[in-house]
Amino acid sequence: MRNYFDEHGARQLQAKIEAYWQERGYQVQVDVVPTEYDAKVRSVRYDVRSAMVNGYPQLAKAG
């Protein structure tokens, strides 16, 4: 099972999302943002964030 909550996994997910939309002619910006240390899971979680709404880009196609 992949771990998208650590930095490596979050960066992989970031690249996957950006590549997916780039193949379809959109340029989206996806950020990886670390959260504070969480004692329950004993680690820092990394969030993947973007300005997309419901998973779709809001900007017109590139070019």
Image: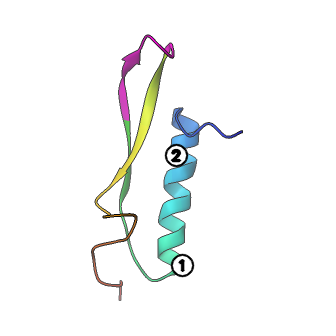
- Look at the image and name its color scheme: rainbow
Question: Residue 23: which numbered mark, if any?
Answer: 1
Residues drawn in magenta = 34-42
Residue 41: image location, x then y, percent: 51, 17
Residue 20 falls in image quadrant: bottom right
Please tell me whether mark 1 sits on a helix, a strand or a loop.
helix
The residue lying furthest to the bottom in this view is 63
Residue 47: image location, x then y, percent: 41, 39
| 36 in relation to 26, above or below | above
Residue 4: image location, x then y, percent: 56, 40
The residue lying furthest to the front in this view is 54
Q: Residue at x 40, y 78 (%)?
A: 26
Seen in the image, is 35 located left or right of residue 3? left
Residue 22: image location, x then y, percent: 48, 75
Sequence-wise first label, 1 or 2 = 2
Graded by Cα atoms within 10 Å as few (under 14), some (14 to 19) or many (20 or more), the crowding at tag 2 reads many
| 51 in relation to 3, above or below | below
Question: Residue 59: which numbered mark, if any?
Answer: none
Residue 36 falls in image quadrant: top left
Q: Is residue 11 magenta?
A: no
Q: Residue at x 35, y 28 (%)?
A: 35
How far apart marks 1 and 2 lie (CA) works out to: 18 Å
Residue closer to the observer: 37 or 62: 37
Q: Amino acid at mark 2?
A: Arg
Q: Amino acid at mark 1?
A: Glu
Residue 62 falls in image quadrant: bottom left
Q: Residue at x 45, y 28 (%)?
A: 45
Please tell me whether mark 2 sits on a helix, a strand or a loop.
helix
Question: Residue 11: which numbered mark, if any?
Answer: 2
Graded by Cα atoms within 10 Å as few (under 14), some (14 to 19) or many (20 or more), the crowding at tag 1 reads few
Q: Quadrant of the N terminus?
A: top right
